[in-house]
Image (spheres, helix red, strand yellow):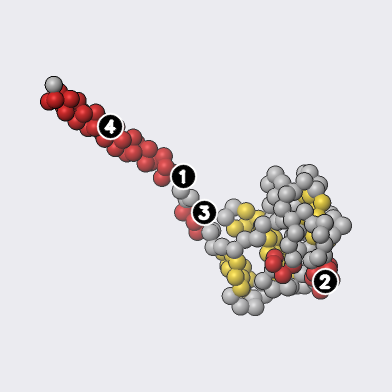
Amino acid sequence: MVAKSGRRDFLYIATGSVAAIGTGLYAWPLIDSLNPSADVMALSKIEVDLDGMEVGQRISVKWNGKPVFICHRTPKEIAEAELDDNNTKLIDPATDVERVQRKEWLIVIGICTHLGCVPIGQKIPQNRGPWNGWFCPCHGSIYDTAGRVRRGPAPRNLDLPPYEFRDNAMVNIG
């Protein structure tokens, strides 16, 4: 009786092991296909030359398939952002200093934090809302000159990408 039980246990373990290894070998190509492609990995870090940007100009670049808004803020925009640092009515309170590395440059991911729309306000004739930042026409979220949400259904401020200034004219994003 003991011998049959031992053989049966061995068969169960051997069958389970073969099934687990077979499932792993079968699933590996599927799991591996979920990794980012080479072109996406190549864009995981970008270098942006800020040398030609004038004060008040805004540009958009693409990083990881997302728009990134780069704003060379005017002294008036900086003053407006700093004036509202102590505003307790902000939906997602954050100071301007927490959102920028250099006062004159604001770099944010240009995707509304409500449902993923792209806010307008990068070009001069577009509606920037009452706080002179960005306006999401899909659901009405309004952002200020520091990318903080001021009104609307967006639950948080525009997200900040990881970035660092290499020198006065170059910034690495990613």
For this rendering, which residue is in front, 11 or 157?
11
| Mark 3 Cα shell of 10 Å, populated few (<14), some (14-19), many (≥20) | few
Along the horizontal axis of the image, is 110 left or right of 4?
right
Q: Which residue carries the number 4 mark?
A: 16
User: Residue most toward the top?
Assistant: 1
Earlier along the polypeptide chain: callout 4 or callout 3? 4
Residue 59, picture quadrant = bottom right
Disc nearest the viewer among 4 and 2: 4
Earlier along the polypeptide chain: callout 2 or callout 1? 1
- Image height of 72 relative to 121, above or below: below
Which residue: 42% across, 42% down?
Answer: 31
Q: Which residue carries the number 1 mark?
A: 34
How many angstroms separate mark 2 from mark 1 (CA)?
45 Å
Which residue: 54% across, 58% down?
Answer: 43
User: Residue most toward the right?
Assistant: 130
How many angstroms separate mark 4 from mark 3 (CA)?
38 Å
Q: Which residue carries the number 2 mark?
A: 79
The quarter of the rendered structure image containing the N terminus is: top left
For this rendering, which residue is in front, 37 or 100?
100
Earlier along the polypeptide chain: callout 3 or callout 2? 3
Task: Tell me which amino acid carries mark 1.
Answer: Leu
Disc nearest the viewer among 4 and 3: 4
